[in-house]
Amino acid sequence: MSEIISAKGLYKRFGNLVAVDRIDFSVKPGEFFGLLGPNGAGKTSTIRMISCVSPLSGGQLLVDGMDVTKQGRAIKALLGVVPQEENLDPDLSVAQNLAVFARYFDIPAPEARRRAEEVLDLFQLQDKHDEIVDNLSGGMKRRLIVARALINNPKILVLDEPTTGLDPQARHLVWQKLRLLKSQGITMLLTTHYMEEAAHLCDHLVVMHLGRILAQGTPQELIAEHVGRQVLEMRLTDGRREEAIDLVRRHDGVKLEDVEDVIYAFGASENWEQLMEELAPFGEGVRLRDATLEDVFLELTGRGLYE
Amino acid sequence: MSVMGVSYRSYRVWQRNRDVVLRLWFVELVPPIVGPLIMMSALGLGLGAFVELGGDQAYIAFLTPGILSIFPMLWAMFDCGWGAYGRMNMQGVYDAVIATPLNVEDVIAGEIFFGASRGALQAVHILIAASLFTPAYDILQSPLAVLAIPNAFLAGLIFGSLAMSFTSIAPSMSAYNFLFAFVINPLFWFGGAFYPLERLPDGLEILAHFLPITHIVQINRGLVEGDMHWSHLGNLAVALAFAAAFFALAILSMRRRLIK
């Protein structure tokens, strides 16, 4: 099978609100697949349908060849789910959290204990074995949630904003572990609104906005295709702003995006050097830098300027 | 095999709750003996000294089958009411569990079974307490009294399901004030636990027969006094019907709340 997850016309509605608007995508085995988008884009609704906890309003969704509407239990047995909100069991210790969770998958106790030691080891939580969950730091709780999601040796790990709220050290540790798991062949499905995280981890990205897919590809492809290699960033006061915009608009193929008090200029084929010379009188407020996924995102979801 | 989507996996939720109780065994297993003991002493002996039942039965002996009914009811309702709300809305336990091969129906059924088990355990506590008073007051007159334990489980199914149904629509923890005032209170006082139902004014007496607790109390009275009638089969049938109806209601209503 060439696809481990395949969605066709996937549709989700809550009353009058369309959360996921007939999207198509597919995930290859072993891939690190990212759903990128702002809050409300439909990312979480999409993965809740993949995780078989939210029924489809329409379309078709297959996970490992099984239909989510018919074989929910069998699919859930293959998944490890890392939810957005911490939901460790506060009434149980670290080790008990893992043991009780393993039992939900019908894993026999001796094997569950062995798995628990393995994942605690992997996430450097061995010395927290008997600790009450509430006494763990935010970073440790996150690690434990990922460890818990691995207890059933999942084929697919579903990560819903796994590093939201973590400090940089804790985030990098989680990233490192996720890359390690990917190298072991686990398929990864990630949602995030951190562009940096998506760029760091994902092989294939889908950019979602208001329930639709705006673009997909590798991070490099997305950058090359939608914003080009470099981006012009202008932070100017009101009067000078219009002046600069007029100047930039004289160049063909440049697209302007106004985001709060910053104006971005994207344009794959533009000759930036000449433009920068013309903009020299504006001084510090204008700079040229390398394009990132964040720019792709602004380009795709922005309203555009004077179009 | 599954009924209404409930599978053997609901036992996994029961086991989870059991593990939590065992971890906190002292606070979970010791306090439940206190309430019944105080009630037996205060009402059974204290108030009982002023109660004339018209036979040679001591009031504490009349009261005990009532206690064997209302305390299991209370424990199941606390567990599937306040407790379930906390696990569902504050601790995220349900969200975590339904991401595994368990379904919403398994979770709710497991919770109710556990609430019912708490009720049964409470009956064990009460029987032990009652056996302490039995030499002096002839409370447990028949070995059939042991069957108060499964009857408490049945009571737990009824009232655990009822509380779970309330949990499925509770907007906040403070909403449980309604459960306490309008549901628990009448069940507690009007089910014939404290006095023979014939003593109630006619209207209230008829009303009392519509309360599920009344049937649990009547079965317990027969078991403890060793005085069973065919009418107890009727009580059992009514209690089973209440259990089935409330259980189905809890599952359906929780589906509505949790599956989005």
Image (cartoon, coloured by chain):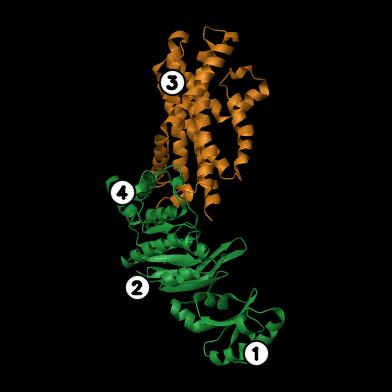
Image depth: mark 2 or mark 4 in front = 4
- Say yes or no: labels 3 and 2 on the same chain: no
Image depth: mark 1 or mark 3 in front = 1
Q: Earlier in the sequence, mark 2 or mark 4?
A: 2
Which chain does the residue under circle 2 lie in?
A
Q: Secondary structure at mark 4?
A: helix
For image coordinates 53% across by 43% down, the residue present is: B86
Q: Decide: is A295 above or below A95.
A: below
Q: Left or right: A169 with respect to A152?
A: right
- The residue singled out by tag 2 in the image is A2
Q: Which chain is orange?
A: B
Q: Earlier in the sequence, mark 1 or mark 2?
A: 2
Q: CA distance from mark 2 to mark 4?
A: 31 Å
Which chain does the residue under circle 1 lie in?
A
Q: Secondary structure at mark 1?
A: helix
The answer to whether one can see residue B38 in this image is yes
